[in-house]
Image (cartoon, helix red, strand yellow):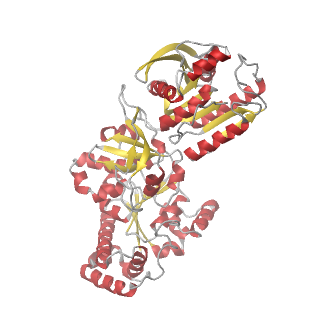
Amino acid sequence: MESRTSKIAYPSNGGTAHGYLALPPSGSGPGVVVIQEWWGLTSHIVDVAHRLAAAGFVALAPDLYGGTTTHDVAEADRLMRALPVERAAADLGGAVDHLLGLDAVTGDAVGAVGFCMGGGFVLTLAAQQGPRVGAVVTFYGVLDGRPDFTGLTAPVLGHFGRLDTTPSPAGARRLADRLAAASGRRPDVRFYPADHAFFNDENPMGAYDADAARQAWAATLTFLRAHLRTAPPRELRTAPGDRTLATASRVVARRPRLPFDWAEADDFTLAEPLPLRRVPADKLLPYAFDLDARELVLTFHADVGAAAREPFLYVEQRTNARYVVRVPFEHLDRAFGPPDPAAAPILIFSIGRTGSTLLNALLGCATSRAYSEPDAVTQLALRRPEFAALGTATHRNLAWHALSALLPSGGGCAVKFRSQAARAMPDVLDAFPSARFIYLLRERRAWGRSVHRAFPGTDSDEAARELLDGVRSLALMRSADVESHVVHYEDLVAAPEHVVAQLLGTPDLSPETTARITAVMARDAQAGSEIGRTSAAPEPRGERRWLADFDAAWAKIRPAHLIDRHCPRLEAGGAA
């Protein structure tokens, strides 16, 4: 079957744009914007759209010159110089909007392929559109000035000729350095024994090279297929009609915060929002709720796995997120799926300083992903009355969506919370009845000593009250109709493989998992943070007096009946 191509008009940058739209034989596929050379929207560019459609993509080639084409170098140069890069990229944003609005387009981001002048435009377009562009291919891209690439999140593939002078190989490498510095991701830059415009088989400059063109095209298709989805990874992710499901905004500034301050919706200053009809759910991490705007604030990450490996997720989000996505409460079920009573993540609560970060890292050796301290649940805990005021149904739904974006479509998942999140235990128990709940404890005086060394300003009475809150949360967990486990820090460090196997319900761990556990145990799970082992004071001044005051404060509020029933080892020095 052949692809179908037609001339179309679509809204763009406050006006109307024109172009060629090519549909694949199947009728649907990932979207790709094809951007012309300085010659205009020639038959060669239309043919590229045809070839992409034949390969399974929905290709849109915008007409940036309003119907004018040329093969005269002087005329092409004049037309290109009359079209500013920034304005052209803004116009091209309409092509992205149009593709993402088509039922024929699958996935939540489009690709962008450009040649010569268009090879420069694709980079600026991707930087302006952020997560809405999921893959960029530039053929011998020519840039005018120094565009701002800080918004670029997509992977980039570049094709350049070794014989080219515009750009030269050295210029192409400098461009790659700029892109890597701006995006944090190194482009895949490939060089061919050919000159500029080696891909253009109309050959207006006499530079067409069939072998180089064939290699570059094969690499382009492989690259686009690897980074653009052929179907949405989750159901219910497209807004009905032409409604906006969410918005995406580039982070332009960050509010100064102390390292362990709670995540707040206004931690970021954002650029003008871009509308999203589809949400890249598997590239988003929940950050905080905006109760005034009634939106969930999430951060976009091209590599969610890398963010998950950080010891404090909310710190990584606050420090390095370059795009923020906001989803209104009424669209959360459509974006991430409605509450699923069968969802079974491993949820780790603790009183802090009990090895919970270590346990999370160890479970990450045997599960598909492990997250440490997503802060939306902490917000649920600290602002419970405000969430409760939204009504029972909304409150329960938000407790689900505080974590829903973290849950993988396949495989296990572990999530470790801050100690304060234990106050949201009732909400999490209600939202995740099939989860495995884990509570970590540590012998009381050893815990007090660790708290005092990591946080020297902690008042002994305050520490005693935190311990009481922890015991009460543990009792609530143990009394609920859920699978629950109590893990003691002393057991975890003595026999980590045994603890992990027990929690996962498996008699044996694979040799690969055991090796990964050994590697985790050899390092500090909180290394690099202010509360890592090397950062905490070995024995702060006045520690003995502080511990005596802590003992006295605890004696006044000690819940003997809860300790005897649920955690007798809390005061047994780690003995059974």
Residue 368 visible at all: no
In the image, taking residue 535 as reference, residue 570 lies left or right, namely left
Q: Position of residue 80 (x, y in %)?
A: 59, 22
x then y, percent, for residue 77? 63, 20
Which one is in front, 108 or 78? 78
Q: Where is residue 360 in the image (x, y as percent from the top left)?
A: 48, 62
Q: Which residue occupies 60% across, 18% down?
A: 78
The N terminus appears in which quarter of the rendering?
A: top right
Q: In this view, does 506 lie above or below 534?
A: above
User: Residue placed at 50% from the left, 68% from the top?
Assistant: 499
Look at the image and tell me whether residue 300 can be seen.
yes
Instruction: Determine whether, in the image, residue 273 is placed left or right of residue 204.
Output: left
Quarter holding the C terminus? bottom left
**74 w.r.t. 220: above or below:** above
Viewer-nearest residue: 365 or 126? 126
From the top left corner, tell me how far across and down residue 94 is, in percent: 46, 25
Seen in the picture, residue 75 relative to 261 is either above or below; the reply is above
Q: How many labels does the image show?
A: 0
Q: Which image quarter: residue 439?
A: bottom left
Left or right of 25, for residue 282: left
Question: Is residue 198 shown left or right of residue 417?
Answer: right
